[in-house]
Image (cartoon, rainbow, N blue to C red):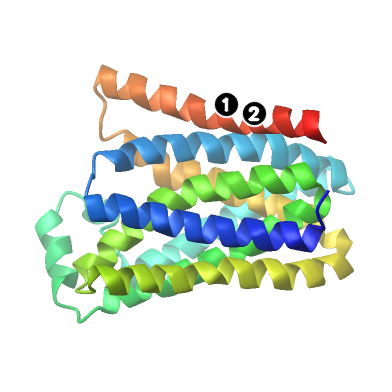
Amino acid sequence: MMNTLTAIILASLFGGVLSVLAAAFVAFKARTSWVPVLVSYAIGALLGAAFLEILPEAFEQATSPQVAAATILAGIMLFFILEKLVLWRHCHVEECEAHAPHEGHAHHDHAHDGGRSGLMITVGDTFHNFVDGILIAAAFLADFKLGVVTALAIIAHEIPQEVGDFLILLHSGYTKRQALLLNILSSFATLVGGALAYYALGAMQAWVPYVLGLAAASMIYVAVADLIPGLHKRPEIHATIQQVSLISLGVASIWITKLLLGDLG
């Protein structure tokens, strides 16, 4: 069994670089039809990791089930407020839901902003990646198998997110090379977050169940509040069947990973 710090560093590096390269590949090929597919799969991976792996561990390690449940509830509220602040600051940047019917308006807002929207996206993404690193470290410190599953779920949801970020950077006036470089630099924040958390959380083991509760809350929130509403834009029966199948595949991949690691562990 490899050393925990090595595992955290490898998972952070692999997660960050792989998701950026996959996003660049999709964006360069401009196969936008892939994005909904990736999103449906990511929803399943996030929910699978949260409910099958992270939550049971958080409840097990917490001082009481009420404390664990309260942490998750507080986390969902926190992510709601954070998202409000982000939307309030630069709703037009993300071409967010509020502007979806006004494509022209959203486009006009940041077609000539001198790359400001791209910069905002990169700052937000860097912070997000830093937090992902902390979550990966907390999961590995709790249990090696939990760390692997958490890292996989984070990679699965990072890919569609990075595709979106990449397209926004291109839209904001950056070249493909600049966009790729910015995304790669931003992805190193996962490594920084993971390494710092390893030393900090190692000394504060009591914090691990709370961080796991927040990790689960962030995954549930992103899946339910951010990604699922987008799927309702395609209500046709064939699209619905495809979405349900891909979400199930995402859940199944986490469950199978958990089983395989159980056999290996």
> How far from the left and from the top, in percent, is residue 240?
33, 23
Instruction: Answer with left or right where residue 113 lies relative to residue 8.
Output: left
Q: Secondary structure at mark 1?
A: helix
When asked about the image quadrant of residue 90, the answer is: bottom left
Residue at horizontal 50 percent and vertical 67 percent from the top: 187
Q: Nearer the viewer, residue 49 or 55?
A: 49
> How far from the left and from the top, in percent, is residue 180?
35, 68
Instruction: Answer with left or right where residue 203 lies relative to residue 41.
Output: right
In this rendering, the answer to whether 231 lies above or below 98 is above
Residue at horizontal 12 percent and vertical 68 percent from the top: 108
To which residue does mark 2 refer?
Answer: 255
To which residue does mark 1 refer?
Answer: 252
Do the residues bearing badges 1 and 2 touch, measured as CB atoms within 8 Å?
yes
From mark 1 to mark 2, how far is it between C-alphas?
5 Å
Looking at the rendered structure, the kind of residue marked 1 is Ala
In this rendering, the answer to whether 238 lies above or below 52 is above
Q: Which mark is residue 204?
A: none
Q: Secondary structure at mark 2?
A: helix
